[in-house]
Image (cartoon, helix red, strand yellow):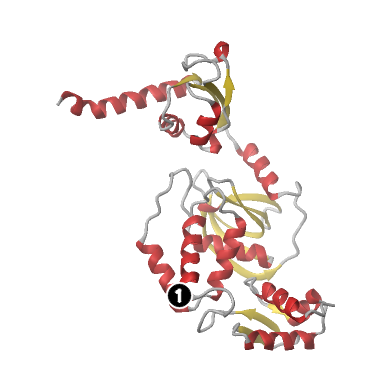
């Protein structure tokens, strides 16, 4: 039993910030106190300004809802708006370092934002355009927060999904984890209709809907959502996958800092293995990796790197680089002639 009242109140508040309704009996079990103590603690939170809503029933339930003002203790209005806008901008593009914890924070914050502040956040979001690298698909923050809420609340999730071939379907899942690769967001979930684990690209998810039905999380085969996603991506690579081999006239550390991580990790090479990339020993590197991304996309990323490079294989990528170079040269011809 938790005898420290302030600590117990903070633990109770943390549970209530999960976007779901908590039966009184379940809260009592989690806190290891009586239901009467839970009711007293709920009253204390209300006195502090937290809008806790109670429902009637055999067991009763509690949910933290949006109130007329921000709850005291943590953030003022300007801070809340600034944080919400920042989290929305980052979460929608799966940027490096903006992981599931940030999305959960956004879900919790937007749950208790008063309507007037939610309107300010939406207005700012609509009036601004983030400058991104273009390496990842844009995702509506609302999609991420709905999914994150069902993960945290262990609530079944229904959504529309568009597969790689364009076929659309409706899915009913038990969401397990959101995983960011630094380029895209993925949902690892148990697909109830197919009776098996699946991974879903979140940018292909539409109309996510929390059903309200609770579930007990199943044991993931790999134990880690990140590891399961890694294996799933490798399994799904189809006949479009190809291996590329590229040498650069620059050190591996320099190239790695400017090359998207999803393209692979280059290694320094000596003069005897540098190919036609140029440079001297220790100043060249080589990249060997596989991908199923379009050749044109890889060629463009290589061209944007800012150093000399040579494509060893495949031939198709070599031809794509040459075509891109010719197109760029022709685009600059009018200025050269003038």
**Relative to 252, 63 lies left or right:** right
* Residue at 79% over, 85% down: 35
- Quadrant hosting residue 62: bottom right
* Residue at 47% over, 48% down: 137
Where, quadrant-wise, is the C terminus in this rendering? top left
**Relative to 47, 284 lies left or right:** left
Q: Position of residue 127 (x, y in %)?
A: 35, 63
Whether residue 293 is visible, yes or no, is: no
Reply above or below: 160 against 235.
Answer: below
- Quadrant hosting residue 60: bottom right
Reply above or below: 276 against 187.
Answer: above
* Residue at 65% over, 42% down: 230
Front-most of residues 162 and 175: 175
**Relative to 60, 132 lies left or right:** left
Front-most of residues 40 and 72: 72
Q: Which residue is mark 1?
A: 117
Where, quadrant-wise, is the N terminus in this rendering? bottom right
* Residue at 43% over, 44% down: 134
Front-most of residues 273 and 283: 283
The residue carrying pointer 1 sits among few (fewer than 14), some (14 to 19) or many (20 or more) residues within 10 Å by Cα, namely: some
């Amino acid at each position: 039993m938790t005898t420290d009242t302030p600590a117990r109140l903070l633990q109770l508040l943390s549970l209530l910030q999960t976007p779901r309704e908590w039966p009184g009996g379940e809260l009592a079990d989690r806190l290891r106190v009586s239901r009467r103590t839970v009711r007293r603690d709920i009253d204390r939170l209300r006195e502090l300004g937290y809008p806790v809503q109670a429902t009637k029933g055999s067991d009763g339930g509690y949910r933290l809802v949006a109130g007329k003002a921000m709850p005291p203790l943590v953030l003022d209005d300007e801070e809340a708006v600034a944080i919400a806008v920042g989290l929305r901008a980052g979460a929608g593009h799966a940027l490096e370092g903006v992981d599931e914890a940030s999305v959960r924070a956004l879900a919790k914050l937007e749950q208790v934002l008063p309507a007037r502040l939610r309107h300010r956040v939406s207005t700012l979001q609509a009036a601004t355009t983030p400058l991104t690298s273009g390496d990842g698909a844009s995702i509506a923050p609302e999609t991420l927060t709905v999914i994150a809420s069902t993960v945290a609340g262990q609530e079944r999730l229904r959504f529309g999904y568009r597969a790689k071939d364009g076929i659309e379907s409706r899915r009913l899942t038990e969401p397990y984890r959101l995983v960011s690769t630094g380029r895209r967001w993925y949902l690892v979930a148990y697909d109830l209709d197919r009776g098996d684990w699946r991974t879903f690209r979140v940018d292909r998810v539409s109309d996510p809907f929390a059903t309200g039905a609770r579930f007990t999380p199943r044991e993931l085969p790999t134990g880690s959502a990140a590891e399961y996603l890694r294996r799933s991506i490798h399994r799904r690579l189809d006949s479009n996958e190809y291996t590329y081999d590229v040498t650069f006239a620059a050190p591996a550390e320099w190239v790695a800092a400017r090359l998207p991580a999803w393209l692979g990790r280059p290694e320094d090479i000596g003069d005897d293995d540098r190919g036609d990339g140029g440079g001297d020993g220790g100043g060249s590197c080589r990249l060997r990796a596989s991908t199923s991304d379009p050749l044109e996309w890889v060629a463009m990323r290589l061209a944007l790197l800012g150093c000399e490079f040579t494509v060893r294989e495949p031939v198709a990528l070599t031809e794509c680089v040459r075509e891109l170079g010719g197109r760029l040269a022709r685009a600059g011809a009018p200025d050269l002639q003038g």
